[in-house]
Amino acid sequence: MTLPNDIRITPELVKSHGLKPDEYDRFVTLLGREPTLTELGICSAMWNEHCSYKSSKKWLKTMPTKGPRVIQGPGENAGVIDIGDGDAIVFKMESHNHPSFIEPYQGAATGVGGILRDVFTMGARPIAAMNALRFGEPSHPRTRHLVSGVVHGIGGYGNSFGVPTIGGEVNFHPRYNGNILVNAMAVGLARADSIFYSKAKGVGLPVVYLGAKTGRDGIHGATMASAEFDDKAEEKRPTVQVGDPFTEKCLLEACLELMASGAVIAIQDMGAAGLTSSAVEMGAKGDLGIELDLDKVPCREEGMTAYEMMLSESQERMLMVLRPEQEKEAEAIFHKWGLDFAIVGKTTDTLRFVIRHEGEVKADLPIKQMGDQAPEYDRPWVEPKKLPLLSDVPAPNDLAAAILKIVGSPDMCSRRWVWEQYDHLIQSNTAQIPGGDAGVVRIRGNKAIAVSTDVTPRYVEADPFEGGKQAVAECWRNLTAVGSLPIAITDNLNFGNPERPEIMGQFVKAIEGISAACRALDFPVVSGNVSLYNETNGQGILPTPAIGGIGLLEDLTKMATLAFKSAGDEILLIGGHGTHLGQSIYLREVLGREEGAPPPVDLAVEKRNGDFVRNLINTSQVSAVHDVSDGGLGLAIIEMALAARLGASLQPLTHERLFGEDQARYVVTCAPSAAAAISAAGGKAGIAVDRIGHVTADATLNIAGGPSISLDQLRSAHEGWFPAYMSGEL
Amino acid sequence: MKAKIKVTLKSGVLDPQGKAIEGALGHLGFGGVEQVRQGKYFEIELAETDAARAREQVKAMCEKLIANTVIENYEIELA
Amino acid sequence: MKAKIKVTLKSGVLDPQGKAIEGALGHLGFGGVEQVRQGKYFEIELAETDAARAREQVKAMCEKLIANTVIENYEIELA
Amino acid sequence: MKSAVVVFPGINRETDMMLALEKVTGTKPVAVWHTETDLPKVDFVVVPGGFSYGDYLRCGAIAARSPIMSDIRAKSAKGLKVLGVCNGFQIITEAGLLPGALVRNAQLRFVCREVKLKVENNATFFTNRMARGAIVSCPVAHGEGNYICNAETLKRLEGENRVVFRYAEGSNPNGAMNDIAGIANQSGTVIGMMPHPENMIEPLHGKTDCRPLFESLLAA
Ligand SMILES: Nc1ncnc2c1ncn2[C@@H]1O[C@H](COP(=O)(O)OP(=O)(O)O)[C@@H](O)[C@H]1O
Ligand SMILES: [Mg+2]
């Protein structure tokens, strides 16, 4: 069979579509003929890294994805977990790195829009959002503009849509100068018995187009998003996708209303490679063919070609297979919300993906090969070199100065400037706003969930395996520190160019580490996203596997917060004193060195200590809890003091003890009368419990035999950096 | 001198605002509205008195700050 | 026909955006910027072909929706 | 006390408001869709917060011109009690129920934070359970809450004791004139405010400072 082929497919054209010659040959063999331009476009979109996971599949398969609470693991729009009482939590994290680098406001905004869509496509109402951000060094000429645009864009979309943004991360590092990371996470609530999937069922059923009209937005965004950057990036720019949170909000309400009516058989949002990937996904998953008539597609612009319609990444669109008898009802719902509704095709039993436009067949492809049988690579990789354990790191000349430097450093200072631009209260269920160890939102009654995103890229760079373990462990620890039981994670694996064996080595070992931690902590991976080729002129980002975790709080009245509660309370360090300064914030910020092995993570100890602390919280034995992570014990205690306007008086502490970043540790406070019992219980469990001081009414941090610093001083350092930097004063 | 600058979205770039206004005008009973596009408008008072130099300056301001040339075009008028 | 509408803040109404741009231009090293005022700009495609009637329509649109006459002035140009 | 909450496309704090009304007053309000032309018989109507029509053109501008608002305008002229919160304040102001305008926050950023509110007028249907001069905590969440009006309007608002809420203790988050957080019309039957009392009524919210506002509705 041949198709009318207006444009000759040259090697250059193939290359410009990001297809390698062998991949193109594979495609031609598959077709038994030369493809049309539309077919080439479809193939390039489906087979690029972003949609096909061709470099990562092999390794993603090795992650633990099962567990008693898992309703849906990786492979759908989002993961689904059971939280009891017939409730399910639907969540996922996704990157929008390259678009945000090119146009920070719209890139970040549409990133948020995309992940929200992934969640409500499955029938869940979004109840929380998070964002993990990585920028270049503050002194880089573009950094301020990028931070401002990205934060503004995340707020602009999420606030208008109406989801509380309750947490995230912000890091700065020169290795992100040419490739920032914008990872957005969304969490939704659904009934466990009414989750919606993308798998089409039934032959001859209408395929319906919902939402906004199709324009030329982001054509080739999907292929762009997997192309390594060079200085020409700005020229390679696709027409930027513009987000419309208002339409998305209407789309959410319309979809939930329609789902409740029982009319929906299968539904899939149009993300990267819009109409193409959504249609192929629905068909391939359901072992069905799909026929689309592009003359029926609602277009925003004149004279759009089949190629453009199939590759457009216009936002706020959905594709759905509908029960024919409820067509009119469905249409009425969408028109009520002012959205487009058009029947653009039907399901078939041919297993072909057929595109008609203006009376011509523009594409006729084997649907399964385009979808779940895309190429898969086992890329060569090398074992990362181990760095030596760093011993005897010198003490600072001036301890007070060192503390203030760390408290006010770009990575450690307060993120208030960021999260005050996010509506973290909407929906009336926010029990813990940003600034604590995890964001917490009420589900109903006293049941709530906690959410945290974590990774320490400098650890992963120094040791991908330990760093991968640490990212999961810290997330688990943050969820534990508010008293919740960690139950599942999503991930966003941001790495450099996988065609370089050392980068692939980082990827492989990080996944090994993540998997080991997930197994040890009963913390399965239920969804995720991979972003590769984060590299500019051969310089890759720090490997950044962001972990987004969900914890369950059965009784909100037991929730712990990090603020000191009352003067006189004893301060206990659980998990032993700090010793490890390799790759620490102290080493970097005070001594200006990024060296050595990161702190090792003993997963058994992590679990034992965490379960112990969670039990203290659930039995109301402690008044405040904070995990010890970046910056060590010193920063943890300062954050607890600043949050309460209460001081702390501490026994003598060496710089190892103050700044060591040893894992599996927590700071808790309790009534003096309760301290003995807690250390006794710790003793029995073989857990070090050190009574290191007490909370004071006077607003100073007091270290016996060391400095004493007023909270005002600490606060202005902690709160000062971000606003000063953003206003251009730094 | 005074510079008047019109900043408009490049053609093809989605304009949610324009779309919403279009709809609202319809509901208010205004017929025959085929399309609405929303842009920005700026008036800048300059110390510069030489038109050519003023235009140069304003062009640079647009490129650097006033217009987001990734998605917007601009048009300068001097008075 | 096509209507071009400039909506500007009434003099005396403070304009935080304009002020911010003024400041930013200063930071960027643009001297001699005495004042910046930000307004809105609209382009409306009309079915109407008669200029007088078109102007009437657009005037009504501005009064009813497009400008907030409590704080804004508008200026219509037909093309 | 029968109340209604008006819903426009893009409004997103209607559930927060309905929950607060139900939790404090004990009666569930009715939700009214913007295309309705006739408001059901109620003692009190709330225009809630959100981003009606995406805040496109101007915050509240498009919603203010929808069918239901004409009926609310008519009924408020006959004394119907109206409360506009955040986007609701912007909507009823655009609709001409209150004077002045709400423009971009002075710092040009959206702000979500707890502020202190001073109750300047406790003789209204929404403040009668509060002491005059009382200071309460209340969250704000808006990008365009900067209240402005001309000199004589400001003079009248102050002179006629129509400033109901003022940002206290230097907590003005948006640069509003005279720290104005909420105002009333001449007869005191229409109140608009930027802060979100509906988000501070139960222990979960950290404080319950704003419960008395809703309790006031029962006395009114
Ligand atoms: N981009 C962001 N958006 C919202 N909240 C953020 C963001 N970045 C950091 N935060 C919040 O600031 C606090 C400190 O962040 P971080 O130091 O990463 O916490 P932790 O060390 O407990 O993981 C957390 O409550 C976090 O949720
Ligand atoms: Mg923490």
Image (tube, coloured by chain):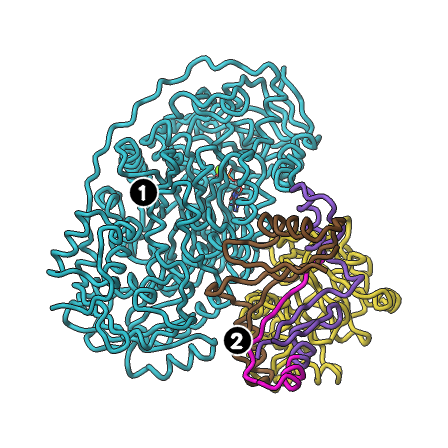
Chain colours: A cyan, B brown, C purple, D yellow
Q: Position of residue A258 (x, y in %)?
A: 38, 74
Q: Residues within 10 Å of mark 2 (few under 14, many from 20)?
A: some
Q: Residues within 10 Å of mark 1 (few under 14, many from 20)?
A: some
Q: Could you say which disc has been placed on residue A522 in the image?
A: 1
* Residue labelled with disc 2: B35
Quarter of image, res A315 = bottom left
Chain letter of disc 1?
A
Q: Is residue A324 above or below residue B7?
A: below
Residue D4 lies left or right of residue A663; in this view the side is right
Mark 2 vs mark 1, foreground winner is 2
Residue A200 lies left or right of residue A633; in this view the side is left
Q: Secondary structure at mark 1?
A: loop
Which range of residues does the magenta coloring cover?
Answer: C37-58
Are labels 2 and 1 on one chain? no
Chain letter of disc 2?
B
Residue in front for this viewpoint, A669 or A53: A53
Q: Residue at x 47, y 79 (%)?
A: A336
Q: Residue at x 36, y 67 (%)?
A: A318
